[in-house]
Amino acid sequence: MKLIVNADDFGYSRGANYGIVDAFKNGIIRSTTIMAGMPGYEHAVELLKNCNGLGCGVHLTLSAYKPLLKSHKTIVDENGYFYKKITPEVAKNIDIEEVYNEFCAQIEKVKASGIDITHLDSHHHVHTFEVLKPVMERIVEKYPYPIRGGLEYKLDYEKIMPYEGIFYEDTVRIDTFKNLKDKFANYDVLETMSHPAYLDSFILENSSYNLKRIKELEILTSKELRNFLEENNIEVCNYRDIFK
């Protein structure tokens, strides 16, 4: 049995970056996804150079901070920032060409930084929205990386990772991982997300999900969790270990 515990939000801030690297070096994280437009991006790129074995994908973003491209009209507010909340209903009113162009720009920036991209997922799971299916069809045709599952639509694509979003908010506890054993009855490999971080002012001022990030880091680096996974022959890995 193989488990990918992906650390979302790499690049969000220095506090997020340090937390993710700590969870890799001292815990069970082997996979992360980077946000190309966030203030901590360059810092994350530098840290990644000393994290051999930490696979890094792209955390496609439509609902945090600013886009990379400045030409958008429907996916930003009057100040040029992404809207903080994108729901499937809101997404129906945006120009999907803008979304496609922005996603491409984010992927290209990560590639240009020298990162060997392992996979794609998204902030607030926007890539799973059925209204954005046409965007993702074009994205995986142009960039045939594996993608996180949990899609609201059927996608004719072989590189979709089964996904269970089980480690968040009220489920941030070790027992959540212990209950994963039942999930493996249906999967040989499974992914869940995580958000380990050390808190800094940017996280506190911009993310409603903040204090739980510290708790996540504590659990993800705990000896109890590492022992449980080892005793149950659950191997932590990243996308590259699966899609070689």
Image: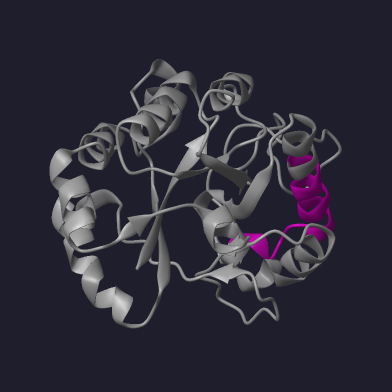
Relative horizontal placement of residue 86, taking residue 22 as reference (left or right): right
Screen quadrant of the N terminus: bottom left
Q: Where is residue 123 in the image (x, y as percent from the top left)?
A: 54, 48
What secondary structure characterizes most of the magenta part?
helix
Is residue 176 shown to the viewer in this render?
A: no
Q: Nearer the viewer, residue 155 or 67?
A: 155
Instruction: Name the residue: 80% across, 40% down.
Output: 108
| Image mark count | 0
Q: Quadrant of residue 105?
A: top right
Query: From the viewer's perspective, is 83 left or right of 196?
Result: right
Q: Name the residue at 46% across, 26% down.
A: 17
* Residue 171 in which image quadrant: bottom left
Q: Position of residue 57 (x, y in %)?
A: 61, 46
Image-based side of 205 in relation to 117, left or right: left
Estimate the x, y position of residue 139 in percent, counting from the top left: 78, 60
Q: In this view, does 222 lie above or below 171?
A: above
How far across and how far down the image is residue 126, in percent?
Answer: 58, 58
Figure check: 141 above or below 201: below
Residue 93 colored in magenta in the image: yes
Residue 10 lies, with reference to residue 154, above or below; the image says: above
What kind of colouring is applied to the model shown? Answer: one colour
The answer to whether residue 3 is visible is: yes
- The stretch of residues the image draws in magenta is 90-106
- Image quadrant containing the C terminus: bottom right
Question: As drawn, is 150 to the left or to the right of 41?
Answer: left
Q: Nearer the viewer, residue 230 or 136?
A: 230
With respect to residue 200, does 154 lie above or below? below
Question: Is 121 or 50 nearer to us in this picture?
Answer: 50
Q: Does the magenta stretch include residue 91?
A: yes
Q: Which residue is found at the position 36% from the left and 27% from the top?
A: 22
